[in-house]
Image (cartoon, grey):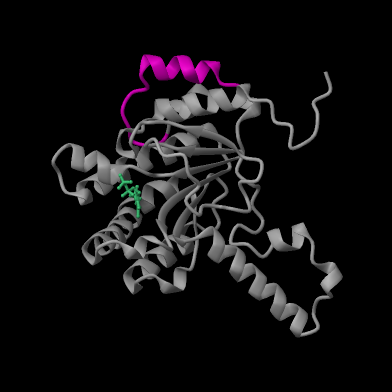
Amino acid sequence: MLKRITGLFNRQKVTEDENKLLQSIDRNRLPNHIAIIMDGNGRWAQRRGMPRSLGHRAGVESLRSIVQLCSELGIKVLTCYAFSTENWKRPQEEVSFLMNLLVEYLDKELEELHSNGVKINAIGRLAELPQPAREALDRAFRKTENNSGLLLNLALNYGGRREITDAVVKIARLVKDNRLEINEINESLIKEHLYTAGMPDPDLLVRPSGDFRISNFLLWQLAYTEFWLSDVMWPDFKRIHLLQAILEFQCRERRFGGLIKK
Ligand code: FPP
C-alpha cells in the first residue's frame, strides 16, 4: 500500500507527520464517500491583503492535493462544493474568475487525473454554466468516462434545495405520464432522481474555515453523514488535515438512529 501512497502523481515527499497518520488509518474502514465544502478562500486572501481571486487560486492547490490523496488512498467518491446556486450573487468579476479557474483546472489537470484513473463528474444545473465551462466539463467527462478509480464529483451551480426540487419535478412528470404510481414513490426512488443517483451517501463531510453550516449542500444525502469541522481556511487545508479527519471518522460510533450491539 505504501507504494500506492508514495504514488503515481507528481508531488512532494510524504512528511513524517503524514506518515504517522497514514500508518494509524485503518485501510479497511475508509469512508467510501467524502464531501468537502471548500470554504475560506476569500478570507484567506483578504487576511493577506490580497484580492479574493488569489484565495480561489490557492484553493485550487488544496483541491489538487486532496484529490490526489483520496485517489491514492482508494476513496471511492469525493464531492467538492465549488460553486453554489447562490454564488451567482457575487460580483460578476469574481464569478467570471471562478468559471475561468474551473476551465483552467480541468484543462491543466486532465491528463494527470486520467492517467491516475480518476473519473470526473459534476453535479448541479450544468446547463446554466457558461459555454467554456460546459465544454471543458464535457471534455473531462468524455476522457475519463471509463475510468474506475476515484469518482471526483464537482458540485457546480449546485444547490441542495434545487436538486430536490428537480427530483420532485422529474417524479411528478412520470406520474403525470402514467409511468409511475403515487404509491411507488419512496426514499430509494427519490434518491435515484437526485444528481447523485447511483452514488453512496457521503460518510464524512469536511468543512474548513470555521463556519458551522451546511450551506445548501447535499441536503438529502447528509442525513447520517459524520461532520468534521476545522478553523483552517481551505487554501491552508493540507493532506494532513484530511488524514486527521479520516482518523477521527474512524473513531466515531455510527448508529444511523439504531443501537450498537455491545
Ligand atoms: C468558498 O470560499 C469557495 C468558493 C465559492 C469557491 C471554491 C473554489 C475553489 C476552492 C477553487 C477550485 C474551484 C474550481 C472551480 C476548480 P469563499 O470565497 O466563500 O470564502 P470566504 O467565505 O472566506 O469569503
> From the image, which quarter does the N terminus lie in?
top right
Residue closer to the observer: 223 or 104: 223
Residue closer to the observer: 141 or 36: 36
Residue, x 50% and y 60% (percent of image)? 159
Residue 101 screen position, x and y as percent: 28, 56
* 34 relative to 42 in the view: left or right: right
Residue, x 38% and y 46% (percent of image)? 112
Residue closer to the observer: 58 or 1: 58
Position of 62 relative to 129 (above/below): above
Magenta residues span 8-26
Residue, x 49% and y 20% (percent of image)? 22
Count of numbered tags = 0
* 19 relative to 58 in the view: left or right: right
Residue, x 24% and y 59% (percent of image)? 94
Residue 170 screen position, x and y as percent: 66, 74
Position of 19 relative to 63 (above/below): above
Residue 64 screen position, x and y as percent: 36, 42
Residue 17 in the magenta stretch? The answer is yes
Residue 7 screen position, x and y as percent: 43, 31
In the image, farthest residue toward the left: 49
> From the image, which quarter does the C terminus lie in?
top right
In the image, farthest residue toward the front: 212
Position of 175 relative to 210 (above/below): below
Residue 152 in the magenta stretch? The answer is no
Res 2 seen here? yes
In the image, farthest residue toward the bottom: 177
Res 71 seen here? no
